Amino acid sequence: MRVLGIETSCDETGVAVYDTEQGLLAHTLYSQVDLHAQYGGVVPELASRDHVRKLIPLIKQVLAESETNKVDAVAYTAGPGLIGALLVGVSVGRSLAWTWQVPAIGVHHIEGHLLAPMLEEAAPNFPFLALLVSGGHTQLIEVAAWGKYKILGESLDDAAGEAFDKTAKLLGLGYPGGPALAELALRGNPNRFDFPRPMTQRPGLDFSFSGLKTHVLTTWNKQEQQDEQTRADIARAFEDAVIDTLVIKCRRAIKQTKLKTLVIAGGVAANKRLRSSFNEKLNINIYYPRPIFCTDNGAMIAYAGALRLLNNQSEALAFKAYARWSMFD
Ligand code: KG4
Ligand code: ZN
């Protein structure tokens, strides 16, 4: 069975075709990074308008590339995300499903991220522990089986990606900040500054990253020499603190749940130093999506939609989009 997947929850227009027998047949992504860069962050109205411009041509492109003239379902991100941006994908997805008389499947964006490693040849098996680290969420989730998700811990304030982005802004790096900060940190001295690992002294699996950016700001303001090396050293200390905190909490969650497999997904999972640090420090099987499927994309939505289709889950005629949407009971 073949599923068209559509992702428009934020600033990437992603489209893909997934076949339950042949795997991923085509995928494409248009990033709005250049559009939002001058504002230093995503402008919701501009994001929606750009999805309107790009979505239909991208759909035509992936259908042609995958030589698809008939799909068995249309899956789209129904939330959470920016409501105007979501509504573009939701209404186009539903209209196509209606026209083609196939099921329409609303996918939870976080479920898409969690299942993204399953698009890889070496895919994880259920059950697993998942660390979702994106721009909007930082969550530790126990995944017992498909559709059985239990939240074990989450950020009480900024998400990990958000902390990267805000810290990058403080350090005068461009938007999007996460990759720029990671790049700068590569040139940083790991021994010059030692930042706190927030909430690791207390029991539990929740996170808090907002204090780290304040730490960055006060450290920067205290420096007599505000040069490039100092900026890189601070970026490195910040990145080390975030990664170390995530490792400590995952180690704790593994101990608590006794799960043998860890999945790391979401935009921050693209971070190279995060991957090497986890691989080095945790003696457990770790699965990541390929870097382009860590950040928002249509392939993960097509895949999550295909699983829903196989499990006979589709939407009734009325359509819905949710700016906020809990995946847990
Ligand atoms: O999953 P995603 O595309 O969007 C959300 O659903 O939020 O994640 C985007 C986030 C941004 O905060 C971005 O700065 C961060 O992922 N990110 C990174 C890296 N690549 C993307 N953070 C650190 N290092 C990276 N290499
Ligand atoms: Zn995302």
Image (cartoon, grey):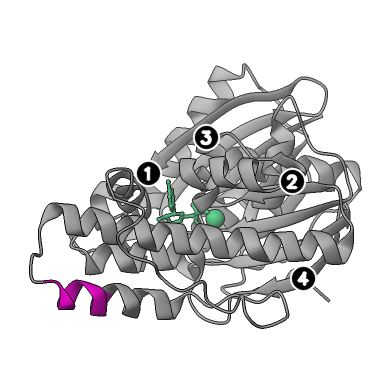
**Can you see residue 108?**
no
> Please, what is the three-letter code of the amino acid marked with disc 1?
Ser
Q: Please identify, in this view, whether the residue under mark 4 or under mark 2 is nearer the observer.
A: 4
Indicate yes or no: mark 4 CB to ligand 1 under 8 Å.
no
Image quarter in which the N terminus is found: top right
Q: Earlier in the sequence, mark 1 or mark 3?
A: 1
Give the distance between the C-alpha atoms of the residues marked 1 and 3, in whole angstroms.
Answer: 15 Å
Which residue is the site of mark 4?
Answer: 151
Q: Please identify, in this view, whether the residue under mark 4 or under mark 3 is nearer the observer.
A: 4
Magenta residue check for 299: no
Is label 2 in a helix, a strand or a loop? Answer: helix
Range of residues picked out in magenta: 217-223
Which residue is the site of mark 1?
Answer: 31
Which residue is the site of mark 3?
Answer: 59
User: In terms of depth relative to the viewer, which is nearer, 21 or 199?
Assistant: 199
Is label 4 in a helix, a strand or a loop? Answer: strand
Q: In the image, residue 169 lies at what x, y percent?
A: 25, 65
Which residue is the site of mark 2?
Answer: 304
User: How would you rate the neighbour count of disc 1 (Cα within 10 Å): few for under 14, some for 14-19, many for 20 or more?
Assistant: some
User: How would you rate the neighbour count of disc 2 (Cα within 10 Å): few for under 14, some for 14-19, many for 20 or more?
Assistant: many
